[in-house]
Amino acid sequence: MKLIACALIVSSLSALSSAQQCGGTHTTDFSSSFDGGWTWGGPSQSTPTSGGFPGAYLRTAGIDTFAPQLRTSGASIFTGDYRAARVTALGVDLRSFAIDFPSSCQRPLSLVLTNDNGTPGNFADDTFVYFVSPDDIPCVDGLWRSYSVAVPSQSSTLPAGWSVDPNSTSSPAQVWNRVITDVSSVTWFYGDPTFFFIFQMWTVGADNLAIAFDGGATTYCTSQRNSASCQPRILAAGTPSVSAPAPFLVTCADVVSQKSGLFFYGPGRQSAPFGGGFMCATLPLRRTPAQFSGGSSTGADCSGAFSFDLNAWIQSGADPALQPGAALFGQFWSRDPAAAATNINLSNAVALSVCN
């Protein structure tokens, strides 16, 4: 099972305009889906079957560039009219395997949406909008990092935090509306796209390219490697809803076995160092009931897992704030007695909105 088990599985261009189910997410995981034409470029791109987050992933080795650019190629569910499709977020998992200069990871990750003006072969008339993330690109530290950027496609003006092509002569609102109603390509850019950096050699990987519709779940933040040398990963499956009869399961895999833990959440997102990992939700926090990870009886491997039915929690009235449209940002906490200093472990996090 991949990082986000999609509530909506579609892959054609025509599907984008009709993919308006509340709470839907589509993910390209390079194991079961390959759509989007995602590419790093360079002569040494491959799709290893293991080593991703988890399983297969898209890798490029020794690419000589000033900034790696993970981008779509051709029409897919990741392109088209975002406003009609009610797109609300894009996400990706990234890892850096090698960089010539380690300090180069001290630059932000940006999301760039481009409109090619109907002439894909002529880059001179392209225009774009972009969002510079507060989170830096991954360093060479052996960790997969999850990124998610909100895309307010229903806004008719340039949303806060977004910028436009500095060479455009149109107003910011005009550029935003032109791009968001006809996205020709999507790029995850290593740095501010209006800056230039020195050329160097990069070996990088990507997994779980996600597009969310009408509040669908995406993942963000960085999970902490546990004492069994695994990096726990959060997953979400279903539609978070105040009325849907089906469950909406938030799960966490690769947890140390035979340990207690729980899911907690808050009204906003952050990525603040805490307990050897990262606190990914803001105050006030709500904790759900404790669970047991199960798995191997040894209590020393990564066969443990947690699962929480968020719909049952929402519909029970346990948290009156979880009404339609409410945003939720949550992650799993678990005990890890063999971990240095803090004896706890924190997963990466999930961001979503509650549906009717």
Image: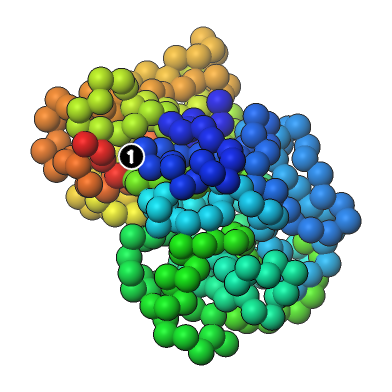
Q: Nearer the viewer, residue 320 or 252?
A: 320
Image height of 208 relative to 306, above or below:
below
Q: Residue reaching furthest right?
A: 43
Mark 1 residue type: Cys
- Give the quarter of the image for residue 21: top left
Q: Which residue is mark 1?
A: 22
Q: Residue reaching furthest top?
A: 297
Image height of 289 relative to 65, above or below:
above
Q: Position of residue 182 (x, y in %)?
A: 52, 62
Residue at 68% across / 38% down in the picture? 34
Q: Nearer the viewer, residue 215 or 189?
A: 215
Horizontal side, residue 321 vs residue 82: left or right: left
Categorize mark 1 by other alpha carbons within 10 Å: few (<14), some (14-19), many (20+).
many
Q: Nearer the viewer, residue 83 or 266?
A: 83
Q: Is residue 43 visible?
A: yes
Residue at 38% across / 42% down in the picture? 20
